[in-house]
Image (cartoon, rainbow, N blue to C red):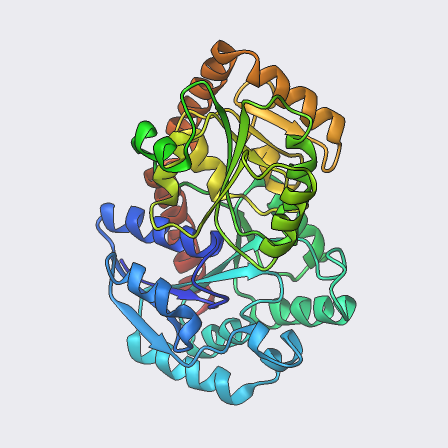
């Protein structure tokens, strides 16, 4: 099958980009012909370089929603760009187009382009909370615009967890909306040398490392982790692999709680997934999520995962068995749960092994690719039937 993956091009780093990298790898291993298209904007250069090691990369005039002054509204009425992209799609002529959208309003011009091209298409939506729910400026009209684009384009949608499928179906709301498929994410396995990374962080084998791989942004709730760490024993350290706009605020909080010797800000790392081997517990206190790849990668590394009870996380973690799901900002629950794991290495090992088995059975690249191909085949079949 000739498959064109099209990125809505929100940036080079994030779960959406990891998703396409993982999916492309899994599809190629199944024998499919994969290409990826993304924006010509320089914010996609890093991702283009990464993907060029996986499959051929096409740079097209995709203009990301967040580079538009009126966001989704501008994308919806940018007929020139829609037609331009439709021409690119028709010229490439894949068997199916798969669009990757970070959130509900992202990439609307690509949806219209796929419709105009007349090629079987589908689109993955990662964050299924509405702009209004996320308290975005003008959220209600941005939601209205996105909903209208879905109805008009009729591009079938993929959600990455049962909860996200429910949220997306609820957002669309009524009869006549495009079909929504549930395809649970899969992720690359995490393998690395524990001693090497712990030596880099300056921690010994008696130190219990709480680790997180994520952007340092408000969504990930970074300041909350400092307040929790301050209540844990001194042999507990935090390693944050990633960077972002809230790093200065996080650094201020580290000083405030006198945690300079217990927090290691590792920055962006090309081998972030491998660095998980140096963790003892994976933490993710996000305010909201789609279906986080980092959790799946942590599970593959046999790590117990302590994460917020939000959106797709509960579809990845079985609380008490493969990790723990805790209410956002319930500091006492986070402190007591983490302390119980710090004090019980055999419990960490047992839960971590359960997590790895869950990854192998449910969240491998092959499993995700096979589920996605089943969607492609259904979309192509229905498109052919409709156009008889």
- Comparing 37 with 219, the one in front is 219
- Comparing 153 with 227, the one in front is 227
Q: Is residue 141 above or below residue 53?
A: below
Q: Specify whether 362 is left or right of 182.
A: left
**Is the N terminus in the top left, top right, bottom left or bottom right quadrant?**
bottom left
- Comparing 327 with 380, the one in front is 327
Point out residue 39 in the picture as x, y percentages from the top left corner: 41, 74
- The answer to whether any part of residue 342 appears in the image is yes
Corner quadrant of residue 283:
top right
Corner quadrant of residue 247:
bottom right
Q: Is residue 134 above or below residue 110?
A: above
Kindly identify the residue that appears in the image at 23 percent across and 46 percent down: 29
Please, which residue is most extreme toward the bottom here? 80
Point out residue 40 in the picture as x, y percentages from the top left corner: 39, 78
Kindly identify the residue that appears in the image at 62 percent across and 61 percent down: 104
Q: Is residue 61 above or below residue 253?
A: below
Point out residue 316 in the picture as x, y percentages from the top left corner: 53, 33
Q: Specify whether 102 is left or right of 258.
A: left
- The answer to whether any part of residue 166 appears in the image is no
- Comparing 105 with 356, the one in front is 356
Point out residue 12 in the picture as x, y percentages from the top left corner: 43, 62
């Amino acid at each position: 099958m000739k498959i064109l993956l099209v990125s809505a091009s929100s940036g080079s780093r994030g779960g959406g980009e990891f998703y396409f990298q993982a999916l492309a790898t899994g599809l190629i291993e199944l024998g499919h012909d994969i290409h990826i298209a993304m924006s010509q904007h320089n914010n996609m250069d890093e991702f283009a370089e990464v993907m060029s090691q996986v499959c051929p990369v096409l740079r097209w005039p995709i203009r990301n929603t967040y580079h538009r002054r009126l966001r989704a509204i501008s994308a919806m009425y940018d007929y020139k760009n829609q037609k331009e992209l439709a021409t690119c799609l028709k010229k490439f002529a894949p068997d199916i187009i798969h669009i990757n959208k970070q959130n509900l309003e992202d990439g609307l011009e690509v949806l219209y382009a796929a419709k105009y091209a007349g090629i079987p298409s589908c689109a993955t939506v990662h964050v299924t909370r509405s702009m209004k729910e996320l308290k975005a400026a003008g959220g209600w009209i941005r939601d209205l615009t996105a909903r209208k684009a879905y109805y008009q384009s009729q591009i079938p949608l993929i959600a990455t967890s049962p909860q996200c499928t429910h949220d997306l179906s609820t957002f669309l709301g009524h009869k006549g909306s495009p079909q929504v498929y549930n395809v649970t994410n899969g992720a690359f396995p995490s393998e690395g040398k524990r001693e090497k990374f712990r030596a880099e962080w300056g921690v010994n084998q008696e130190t219990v490392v709480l680790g997180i791989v994520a952007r340092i942004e408000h969504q990930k709730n970074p300041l909350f982790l400092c307040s929790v760490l301050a209540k844990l024993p001194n042999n507990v350290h935090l390693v944050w692999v990633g960077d972002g706009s809230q790093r200065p605020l996080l650094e201020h909080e580290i000083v405030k709680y006198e945690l300079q010797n217990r927090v290691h800000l590792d920055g962006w790392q090309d081998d972030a997934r491998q660095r998980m081997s140096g963790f003892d517990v994976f933490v993710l206190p996000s305010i909201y999520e789609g279906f986080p790849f980092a959790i799946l990668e942590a599970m593959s590394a046999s790590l117990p995962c302590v994460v917020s009870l939000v959106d797709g996380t509960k579809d990845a973690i079985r609380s008490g068995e493969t990790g723990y799901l805790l209410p956002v900002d319930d500091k006492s629950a986070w402190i007591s749960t983490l302390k119980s794991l710090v004090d019980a290495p055999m419990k960490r090992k047992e839960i971590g092994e359960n997590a790895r088995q869950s990854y192998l059975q449910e969240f491998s690249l092959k499993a995700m690719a096979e589920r996605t191909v089943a969607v492609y085949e259904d979309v192509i079949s229905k498109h052919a039937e409709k156009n008889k």
